[in-house]
Image (cartoon, rainbow, N blue to C red):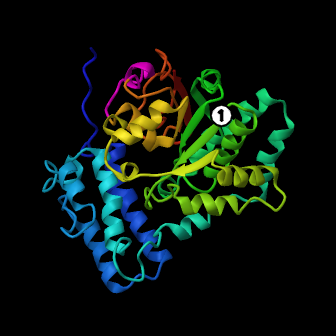
Amino acid sequence: MRTEPSVILSNEPGSFPQSVLRDRHPKIVRRVLADLPYAHDVQARLEMLLQERVVTPLDAGAHDAAAWAVWGADLFGRSWYDVPFLFAENFFYRRLLEAVGYYGEGAWRGIDPFGPQKAADLPGERELAELDALQELPEPEQAAGLVRAALWGNRADLGFRLVAGHTERVDELLVDDSERLWELARGGAVIVVADNAGRELLPDLVLIDFLLRTGRASRAELHVKPAPYFVSDALTADVLAELRRFPPGSAVGGRLDAALRAGTLRLHTEDFYCAPLTFHDAPAGLAARFAAAELTILKGDLNYRRLVGDRAWPATTPFEEVSAYFPGPVAALRTVKSDVVAGLAAGAERGLPASWRTSGAFALVQARG
């Protein structure tokens, strides 16, 4: 059996995880404060979060304090840079929600601190028209075009774009298991685990419509976050906002609305999606959903890290091996925006720029039946 590499931390000088904690998180807080008129107490709590040197537990009265006490049992009191990167990122967003009163009893309860950023990044008429035009193509070309649209829509990550240039062109698809993905969609239930709202969620919805319209799926589930997360991650409210973007008379919009009403498309979420865990630790109910589905499509960087484990895998580690535990056929559509990569062919890294893992210019379509 292969020995698992070390869990990724943020304490390596010059590393990508260190830059996220040092540079990205402060910029996220500054943007939240600029976008919403939070009072002085919220401003102070956010400033205290940025100044915090060691990981501090949630307030004991928080609804999920007990769960985080378990997850952070051996981590509280340590430097943010010395705990697993996956935990540090997840807990930062949970602490941000605590600071702004998202779960509190006041007037700001349930207000998405990233809402203004999401609203400014909704797709426009051009994106809608381009995706609509795909329906005029032969089905194989539609299928290929929608996978590409869903894949490269994953660049629409607002947190990532705060500190990195937004890549507008495809540089290279490092692995392309698209044919295998379509072989796995044979007319049963398909789960799509969403990543970002806005410009990424639109092609995800059109892909779901294609699956249902062509009989490649008999029913579909779209899994979204239960609370604001990683700046642009999709919530139920974001799905509804996206559906309202389709113009009156849109065939796609009409079919998606009808599918939701008929139950052939369902929205689903659970607390796991805002936990510092990988899919190895998925609760029994969620694992059963994956096992019952004919195919689960995981979108984005965070879901990829949850799938293979947030570890320093050699890039040539077989994808089938690190995803073998997942309880059902799975496909990952992911723009590479962090260090974790598996499934590359030997020599595939040669000639790539030093920043290839974190630039957002490269991508993977990987599938395992």
Q: Please identify the dominant SS of the magenta region.
A: loop
Q: Is residue 75 left or right of residue 41?
A: left
Residue beneath label 1, please?
Answer: 217
Specify the farthest residue to the bottom.
40
Q: Nearer the viewer, residue 54 or 86?
A: 86
Mark 1 nearby-residue class (10 Å; few <14, some 14–19, many ≥20):
many
In this picture, residue 25 sits left or right of residue 216: left
Residue 30 point in image, percent of width and height: 41, 70
Residue located at (71% from left, 55% from top): 257
State which quadrant residue 340 falls in.
Answer: top left
Q: Is residue 32 above or below residue 240?
A: below
The one nearer the camera, 290 or 332, is 290
| Res 358 visible | no
From the viewer's perspective, is residue 330 above or below residue 133?
A: above
Report x, y in % for residue 120.
62, 66
Residue 154 visible in the current orientation: yes
Report the amino acid beneath label 1: Ala
> Secondary structure under badge 1?
loop
Q: Quadrant of the N terminus?
A: top left
Of all residues, the one furthest to the right in this rendering is 136
Residue 23 lies in magenta, yes or no? Answer: no
Magenta stretch in the rendered image: 311-324
Report the side of 54 relative to 255 (left or right).
left
Q: Residue furthest front?
A: 262
